[in-house]
Amino acid sequence: MLILNPRNVRFGSLVLDDVRSVSIDRVATREIVEWSDFGPHAVFADAPERKVTIRLVRELTRDGLDAPLPGDSDTLSLRTSPNASDAGGTSVSASAVVTRVTHELLGQARALQKIEFVAISTSGDTDPVTIAE
């Protein structure tokens, strides 16, 4: 899932300004694939363990001293809509842990800050990302 120019991005009480994009990637961390004796193609596959990674990219317009630190845990929430109004908007939230904060200089006193999170499920069997209209 890719969200371009999300509005109202928060990590706990921290407001994250000038966010360019948020991507939510889902990866199987363990795969089960089985074959039969009747041909070369798999007859069964499952992904019993999954990891949800959230990557946030924002442009820094001033010093980025308020960045969360790896290990910080809180609710990441954002609101997105198809236009400048809230009509037809969608809210996305997840309990998340910061795993990485990096910076990239763009020149002319501009920089990108990239924050990576792992989304955490409350029970292990529910999707850690909540999407509400």
Image: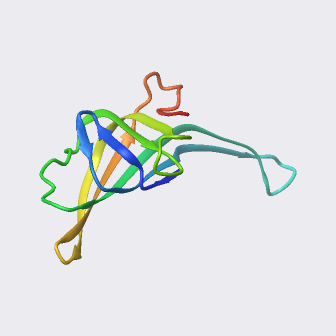
Residue 15 picture quarter: top left
Residue at x 40%, y 41% (from the top left corner): 78
Residue at x 23%, y 67% (from the top left corner): 111
User: Which percent across, then down, holds residue 9?
Assistant: 34, 43
Q: Tell me how many marks there are.
A: 0
User: Which percent across, then down, holds residue 117?
Assistant: 35, 45
Identify whether 14 is placed above or below 57: above
> In the image shown, does 3 or 26 lie closer to the viewer?
3
Q: Quadrant of the C terminus?
A: top right
Residue 95 picture quarter: top left
Q: How is the image coloured?
A: rainbow
User: Which percent across, then down, holds residue 8?
Assistant: 35, 43
Identify whether 118 is placed above or below 74: below
68 on left or right of 1? left
> In the image shown, does 112 or 31 lie closer to the viewer?
112
Name the residue at the right extreme.
Answer: 38
64 on left or right of 40? left
Residue at x 42%, y 55% (from the top left corner): 5
User: Which percent across, then down, holds residue 62?
Assistant: 15, 60
> In the image shown, does 80 or 55 lie closer to the viewer?
80
Name the residue at the bottom extreme.
Answer: 107
Name the residue at the top extreme.
Answer: 123
> In the image shown, does 13 or 26 lie closer to the viewer?
13
Residue 41 picture quarter: bottom right
Residue at x 53%, y 26% (from the top left corner): 126
